[in-house]
Image (spheres, rainbow, N blue to C red):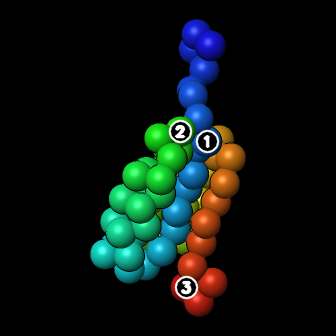
């Protein structure tokens, strides 16, 4: 798989930084194939989506 990323790329969007860190740690511990990026605003999430591809986006519903 030269030049390709391995695993499942996840973008997690939530306005609570402590919650983001907790969920990232849990998911990475559960599955070493998860690559997780976190952002704290919808605007920042949109910018990440414009510049990279993700397999999964997890977003806070009430943001």
Q: Which residue is mark 2?
A: 33
Q: Nearer the viewer, residue 37 or 24?
A: 24
- Give left or right: position of 60 versus 16: right
Label of residue 47 in the image: none
Give the residue at x 52% y 68%: 13
Distance, label 2 to label 1, CA atoms, is 6 Å
Q: How many marks?
A: 3
Distance, label 3 to label 2, CA atoms, is 28 Å
- Give left or right: position of 59 versus 44: right
Distance, label 1 to label 3, CA atoms, is 24 Å
- The quadrant holding residue 9 is top right
Q: For residue 51, say whether it is visible.
A: no
Q: Nearer the viewer, residue 25 or 51?
A: 25
Q: Secondary structure at mark 1?
A: strand
Front: mark 2 or 1: 2
Give the residue at x 43% y 79%: 15
Front: mark 3 or 2: 2
Please identify the residue farthest to the top as the structure is shown: 2
- The quadrant holding residue 42 is bottom right
Give the residue at x 48% y 74%: 14
Q: Which residue is mark 3?
A: 63
Residue 18: x %, y % from top left: 31, 75
Image quarter hosting the N terminus: top right
Front: mark 1 or 3: 1
> Quick one: label 1, few (<14), some, or many (20+) residues within 10 Å?
some
Give the residue at x 68% y 47%: 55
Q: Which residue is mark 1?
A: 8
Q: For residue 26, say whether it is visible.
A: yes
Residue 63: x %, y % from top left: 55, 85
């Amino acid at each position: 798989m030269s030049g390709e990323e391995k695993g499942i790329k996840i973008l997690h969007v939530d306005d609570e930084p402590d919650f983001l860190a907790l969920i990232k740690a849990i998911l990475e511990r559960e599955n070493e194939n998860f690559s997780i990026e976190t952002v704290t605003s919808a605007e920042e999430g949109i910018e990440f989506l414009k510049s990279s591809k993700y397999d999964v986006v997890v977003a806070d519903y009430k943001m």
